[in-house]
């Protein structure tokens, strides 16, 4: 099943830098790798919903999360 959410790479980078964390630190803390984080920040790939949740908790921000286009009507 495709995730209903994606990330804005530039905002993800800004949130990481605001948290004072390097790419290596974030990758290690979420159990991922620097290459994937780099791809997410550059907008080449989207993280899984699980990874997005881990990033939100770690960075204490959801400013980089956005609803995927065509996500459907969620009663709004």
Image: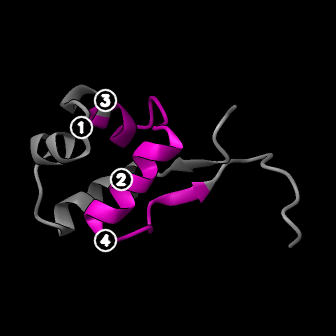
Lower position in the chain sequence, tag 1 or tag 2: 1
Question: Toward the viewer: 10 or 61?
Answer: 61
Q: CA distance from mark 2 to mark 3?
A: 14 Å
Query: Residue 4 at x, y = what percent?
Result: 67, 47
Q: CA distance from mark 1 to mark 3?
A: 11 Å
Numbered disc in front, either 1 or 4: 1
Question: Going 38% across and 38% down the picture, which residue do you hit?
Answer: 40
Numbered disc in front, either 2 or 4: 2
Numbered disc in front, either 1 or 3: 1
Which residue position holds label 3?
36
Q: Is residue 68 magenta-colored?
A: no
Instruction: Quadrant for the C terminus, please.
Output: bottom right
Query: Residue 46 at x, y = what percent?
Result: 49, 36
Magenta residue span: 37-66
Does the residue at mark 1 contact the one at mark 2 (Cβ under 8 Å)? Answer: yes
* Residue 18 vertical placement versus 6 (above, below): below
Q: Quadrant of residue 2?
A: top right
Q: Which mark is residue 60?
A: 4
Which residue position holds label 2?
54
Numbered disc in front, either 3 or 4: 4
Q: CA distance from mark 1 to mark 2?
A: 9 Å
Lower position in the chain sequence, tag 1 or tag 3: 1
Query: Residue 38 at x, y = what percent?
Result: 27, 34
Instruction: Quadrant for the N terminus, please.
Output: top right
Q: Quadrant of residue 36?
A: top left
Lower position in the chain sequence, tag 1 or tag 4: 1
Which residue position holds label 1?
31
Task: Count residues near mark 3 (Cα–Cα under 10 Å), then give few for <14, some for 14-19, many for 20+.
Answer: some
Q: How many marks?
A: 4
Q: What sort of colour scheme is used for the picture?
A: one colour
């Amino acid at each position: 099943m495709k995730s209903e959410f994606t990330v804005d790479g530039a905002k993800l980078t800004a949130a990481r830098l605001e948290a004072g964390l390097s790419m290596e630190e974030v990758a290690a803390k979420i159990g991922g790798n620097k290459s994937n984080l780099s791809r997410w920040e550059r907008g080449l790939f989207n993280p899984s919903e699980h990874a997005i949740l881990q990033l939100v908790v770690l960075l204490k921000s959801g400013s980089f999360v956005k609803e995927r286009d065509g996500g459907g009507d969620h009663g709004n």
